[in-house]
């Protein structure tokens, strides 16, 4: 990445979009390349211009989550950062699972937005702190339930490898089982945890493992590797 961070902005509200663009243009290390208004234009900007960071809304014409997944898969050098009014946990999970590198609420201050863009541009994951606390508090409420759940040896093996960011295929190769079997065990784990998706299951279990000091479980998962369920 160059010293100048190249940015695309996609939002179906022109005034808001232009306001964000004007604020970012004031930063010497930012360059706003192009703006768009829907999911298809987000993909087009990613393909044609390869920005370092692409700001996207959750709610706009087209399928934003599909667009995020396409960009994360086909153009991984483009870091997608969601900027939205949606405080829906499901929207956040869907965006992160699709490959977004951050989730910001539109009430964020200018300096905080600048910090988030810089963090995401260098490869970090950034979520609005207040919203992140809300997500984590929901995970914490499940910890009591988690402690009552016994995973089988194989289920724990699989979820530990998934927690390191491995794909189903990579887990299957490492454990010498079929990819179909990995999916089966992950389904069992999510059912036992009442988790809606892999991100929720992994995050809840990581917090439990860490609180119980149950051994080294590897680096934090990369969310774009957790989109297979």
Image: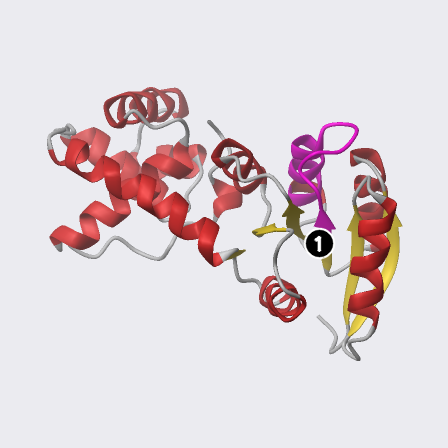
Look at the image and tell me whether residue 214 can be seen: no
Residue 1: image location, x then y, percent: 70, 70
Locate residue 117: give its quadrant. bottom right
Name the residue located 52 percent from the left edge and 57 percent from the top edge: 125
Q: Residue 24 vs residue 185: left or right?
A: right
Look at the image and say whether residue 56 sits in the magenta stretch.
yes
Q: Residue 27 vs residue 97: left or right?
A: right
Q: Residue 180 vs residue 46: left or right?
A: left
Q: Nearest the camera: 171 or 10?
A: 10
Name the residue located 52 percent from the left edge and 35 percent from the top edge: 88
Residue 54: image location, x then y, percent: 73, 53
Q: Is residue 69 above or below residue 184?
A: below
Q: Nearest the camera: 58 or 209?
A: 58
Residue 80: image location, x then y, percent: 66, 50
Q: Is residue 218 above or below residue 140?
A: below
Q: Residue 45 vs residue 79: left or right?
A: right
Q: Nearest the camera: 6 or 13?
A: 13
Label 1: state its secondary structure.
Answer: loop
> Which residue in the structure is indicated by mark 1?
78
Name the residue located 53 percent from the left edge and 44 percent from the top edge: 224
Look at the image and tell me whether residue 17 can be seen: yes
Q: Is residue 61 above or below residue 132?
A: above
Region in magenta: 55-72
Q: Residues within 10 Å of mark 1 (few under 14, many from 20)?
A: many
């Amino acid at each position: 990445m160059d010293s100048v961070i190249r940015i695309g902005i996609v939002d179906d509200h022109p005034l808001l979009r232009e306001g964000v663009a004007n604020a970012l243009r004031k930063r010497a290390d930012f360059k706003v390349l192009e703006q768009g208004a829907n999911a298809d234009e987000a993909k087009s900007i990613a393909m044609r211009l390869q920005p370092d960071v692409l700001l996207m809304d959750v709610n706009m014409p087209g399928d934003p989550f599909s667009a995020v997944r396409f960009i994360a898969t086909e153009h991984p050098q483009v870091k997608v950062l969601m900027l939205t009014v949606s405080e829906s946990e499901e929207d956040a999970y869907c965006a992160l699972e699709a490959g977004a590198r951050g989730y910001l609420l539109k009430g964020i201050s200018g300096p905080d937005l600048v910090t988030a863009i810089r963090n995401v541009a260098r490869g970090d994951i950034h979520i609005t702190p207040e919203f992140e606390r809300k997500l984590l508090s929901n995970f914490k409420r499940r910890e009591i339930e988690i402690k009552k759940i016994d995973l089988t040896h194989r289920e724990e093996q699989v979820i530990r490898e998934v927690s390191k960011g491995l794909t189903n295929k990579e887990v299957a190769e490492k454990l010498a089982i079929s990819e179909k079997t990995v999916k089966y065990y992950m389904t069992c784990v999510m059912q036992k945890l009442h988790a809606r998706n892999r991100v929720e299951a992994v995050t809840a279990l990581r917090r439990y493992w860490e609180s119980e000091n149950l051994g080294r479980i590897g680096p934090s998962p990369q969310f774009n590797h957790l989109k297979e369920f």
